[in-house]
Amino acid sequence: MNGEMHILLVEDNPGDARLLSETLSERSDTIAYRLEHRNCLRACLDAVDQADYSLILLDLGLPDSQGIETFRSVFREVRDAPIVILSGQSDEQLAIAAIQEGAEDFLPKNELAASLLVRTLRHAVERHELKQQARFLAKHDPLTRAYNRHYFEETLAAEVARSHRYKHPIGFLMIDIDRFKGINDTYGHDVGDRALCCVADYLREQLRSVDYVIRYGGDEFLAFLPETNGGTDALARRIADTKLLMDAEDIEVHLTLSVGGSHWDPSSGDPIERALKEADEDMYRAKARGRVSGAAAPIAQTREEA
């Protein structure tokens, strides 16, 4: 771990808080840290609402909360920082319960040697970062950082249920990069990968925060648009009319997109898979119409030619 560790200590006993601060100070030559102290659950929740922390050291016995419920209250509010539990008792069952529910580690206060404390904090941060990476990769395509197809299929059922509940249609745009094989064949897969990332970034910029960009397969992306008014035509035209310029070493690659759209109305009685198929078929019709002007049009040029 690089940089300063910003630690929030939640401890109601002033003596224990002072001891922990002094213990950390003993190893200040090996760990750069900034320590903030709060003495109750409410103050802790206020703090995490206002600042980001590298790690939270949490005593489970506070004036306004006791036991595993203390951890649960903090964990509900803080998912991007590891939590290490402090306890005045060596309660193995409590330790197991907290770790099973998401705590990174459990430290009895009577074992707080400086070397153990620093090692525990570092390992907690490292484990938490690895877990965060694993969670991200479970949902996202590692190249483009768009959502992956598996996550889309998991999310679709929940969005369909919500669509039925609130009577909101769902829109789909199927998007394909024109002449992508030619980019790979001519300039190599590194340039092709950069083209995929460029398109994913562009699509994220065009959509609302509630929408999803999914890498659907190969050079195909799916824009999944919950709670639309059923209209996807304007967005489809804007995306299809865009010409993206991507720098790739000594060349500039011009990217265009073929787009097909559809929407699904929960009152129609049709399966949502039909709307997905319609968007896919509409996208292929766009390609067949020659979305890119002229099959022999250049897909790239050197900067000198530009």
Image: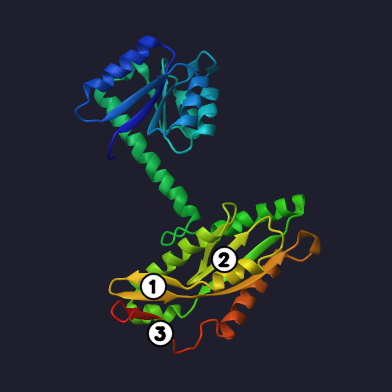
Q: Which mark is residue 290?
A: none
- The residues tagged by marks 3 and 2 sit, at their Cα atoms, a distance apart of 26 Å
Q: Residue at x 26, y 30 (%)?
A: 32
Q: Is residue 36 visible?
A: yes
Residue that mark 3 sits on = 298
The mark lying in front, picked from 3 and 1, is 3
Q: Is residue 148 visible?
A: no
For the residues labelled 3 and 1, say whether their Cβ atoms are less than 8 Å apart. Answer: no
Count the labels in the image.
Answer: 3
| Residue 158, position as x, y percentages in the image | 66, 52
**Closer to the camera, 66 or 240?**
240
- In this view, which residue lies farthest toward the left? 29
Amino acid type of the residue tagged 2 in the rendering: Leu
Q: Which residue is mark 1?
A: 192
Question: Label 3 neighbourhood size at 10 Å, few (<14), some (14-19), many (20+)?
Answer: few
Q: Is residue 52 above or below residue 44?
A: below
Mark 1 nearby-residue class (10 Å; few <14, some 14–19, many ≥20): many
User: Earlier along the polypeptide chain: callout 3 or callout 1?
Assistant: 1
Where is residue 185 shown, x and y percent of the image?
37, 81
**What residue is shown at x 31% (from left), y 20% (from top)?**
112
In this rendering, is residue 123 above or below 190? above
Alpha carbon separation for disc pair 1 and 2: 18 Å
Gap between marks 3 and 1 measured at Cα: 16 Å
Q: Could you tell me which secondary element the residue under label 2 belongs to?
A: strand
Which quadrant holds the C terminus?
Answer: bottom left
Tell me which numbered mark, 3 or 2, is placed earlier along the sequence: 2
Query: Picture coordinates of residue 200 (x, y %)?
Result: 47, 63
